[in-house]
Image (cartoon, rainbow, N blue to C red):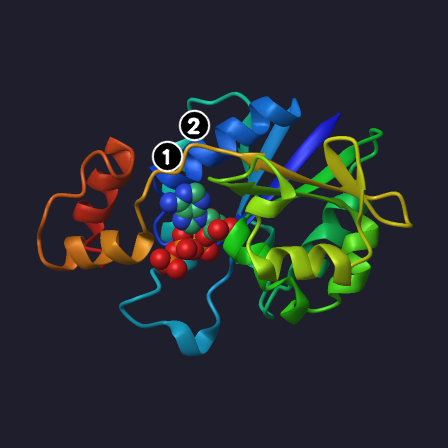
Amino acid sequence: MRIGLYGGTFNPIHMGHLRAAEEVREAMRFDLVYFIPAGTPPHKLDGELAPADNRLEMVRLATKNNLHFMISDFEVRRAERSYTIDTVRFFLSSFRQRTEWFLMMGIDAFCELESWRAADELTTLCNFVVHTRDYGAESELPQNALANVRRFGYRKVDDHYANTSGRELYFVKTTYIPVSATAIRRAARQGKSIRYLVPLEVADYIARHRLY
Ligand code: ATP
């Protein structure tokens, strides 16, 4: 099995997340992609970050018609703050079947990898797939991304990178849909339409629960 792990606040999940996940899944021949909404730290329960259960439900609604898309409530159910390293350890230890694991993220997230907890260990535990709109050659990567490629010891191997532990790093060019969760929340707050920026069921859910 080849499985992608896609974490985010998903506040709310939108077409940009979904299209990127679908294109990465196809390009990487993943059997499954797990969407893993982040938990809600107690001090962040304000109007901006919708409650975790609502964000989880929106991810469920958005992914229910894709047989390859799964959801995980692992981070949402934990009382303490979840770091990606905890989530990856959990997945690695809970699957019996031989599985190749890939952590999925946008290029902006990869550029900040240095600040992640136990980032060095993370790059030795699982593979990374970074989606970006402009990737064709190394020269098209942002400086911060290139710096992290070197910082974490990745070397170029054919169409991807690998580090000394044998874990791989892929950059996958995906169609960029320029929608942002921040702009969607703002529109919802102002009573404007958010249809076609998010799946219809998600737009209805936000309206019904007056989430933002
Ligand atoms: P916010 O506006 O609330 O900061 P966000 O979408 O940037 O929202 P997350 O939900 O945490 O925040 O993002 C999860 C992942 O989705 C990240 O890896 C990010 O790079 C990626 N992402 C964000 N926007 C898009 C988009 N329009 N297209 C593809 N990927 C995206």
| 131 lies above or below 114 | above
Q: Residues within 10 Å of mark 1 (few under 14, many from 20)?
A: some
Residue 71, image x, y percentages:
53, 39
Residue 57 visible in rendering: no
Residue 95, image x, y percentages:
78, 37
Residue 181, image x, y percentages:
32, 53
| 65 lies above or below 208 | above
| 165 lies above or below 117 | above
According to the picture, the residue beneath numbered tag 2 turns out to be: 64
Say which residue appears at 29% left-offset and 33% top-offset.
199
Quadrant location, the N terminus: top right
Residue 144, image x, y percentages:
59, 62
Say which residue appears at 32% left-offset and 43% top-offset.
178
| Residue placed furthest toward the bottom | 43
Question: Which residue type does callout 1 highlight?
Answer: Leu
Q: Are marks 1 and 2 in contact (CB under 8 Å)?
A: yes
Quadrant location, the C terminus: bottom left
| 146 lies above or below 205 | below
SS class, disc 2: loop
Number of the label disc, if any, that sits on residue 61: 1
Say which residue appears at 72% left-offset and 51% top-offset.
88
- Mark 1 → mark 2, Cα distance in angstroms: 6 Å
Residue sitting nearer the eye, 57 or 36? 36
Say which residue appears at 45% left-offset and 75% top-offset.
42
